[in-house]
Image (cartoon, rainbow, N blue to C red):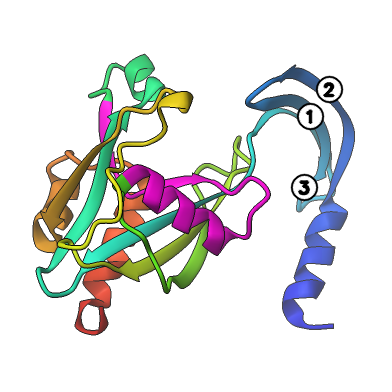
Amino acid sequence: MDQKATERLQDDDRVRLVSKETVWKRFIHLQTMIFDQRMPDGRIIRIDREVHDHGSAAAILLFDPQKGMVVLVRQFRPAAFVNGDPIFMLEVPAGLIDDDAPDQAIRREAMEETGYAVGEVKYLFETYASPGTLTEKVGLFYARVDLEEKAGLGGGLETEGEDIEVLSIPLDQAFEMISTGEITDAKTIILLQWAMLNRTTL
């Protein structure tokens, strides 16, 4: 057994699920969960948590290497509204995986949201946005596009109430928009930082 598996078994032994209860189940599945956790000094403490599950997702950075530009989308985000922040957020194309393989799902989402038909995609890594409360794990991808070759209009699906604006922004400018607060979405920040670190091979 490798070290990672051994550590996982040791960690699993420290936490025991006592009970769980579904509070709400529609688009999201909200559960209350009670755990017993063994502390380093041997004490057992009881933890009461709420966990929000709506499935796994995928996101993609679309980049035109000839123009040095990324494709972002801008759409209404209710949670930003609740916080009193700007309610139309700039993000990379993304969506739930549903029953598809992650690479198939992100090709579908890229086409629906931006109108660009993506062929080869490069899988990068997975990330949790907020593992304290959300089960959502996001697979991050990268693909090249030609901004002059658009296969559809994009803009999202009207049947899902989507109203998505598609923007092409120079990579350097998009990266600067993180520090100015114009881009605050976690998956977008991660992908733009990855692009800046790997720009010589994009």
The alpha-carbon separation of the residues under discs 2 and 3 comes to 25 Å
Q: Position of residue 153 (x, y in %)?
A: 27, 43
> Which picture quadrant has residue 195?
bottom left
The magenta span reads 88-113
Q: Nearer the viewer, residue 139 or 105?
A: 105
Q: Position of residue 192 (x, y in %)?
A: 27, 60
Question: Neighbour class for label 1 at 10 Å: few (<14), some, many (≥20)?
Answer: some
Question: Neighbour class for label 3 at 10 Å: few (<14), some, many (≥20)?
Answer: few
Examine the rendered structure and indicate whether residue 157 appears above or below residue 168.
above
First of labels 3, 1 by sequence position: 1
Contact, CB < 8 Å: mark 3 with mark 1?
no
Q: Residue at x 42, y 74 (%)?
A: 120
Secondary structure of the residue carrying numbered label 3: loop
Secondary structure of the residue carrying numbered label 1: strand
In front of the other: label 3 or label 1?
A: 1
Q: As shown in the figure, which amino acid type bears the numbered disc 2?
A: Glu
Residue carrying label 1: 33
User: Where is the C terminus found, in terms of image quarters?
Assistant: bottom left
First of labels 2, 1 by sequence position: 2
Residue carrying label 2: 21
Q: As shown in the figure, which amino acid type bears the numbered disc 1?
A: Met
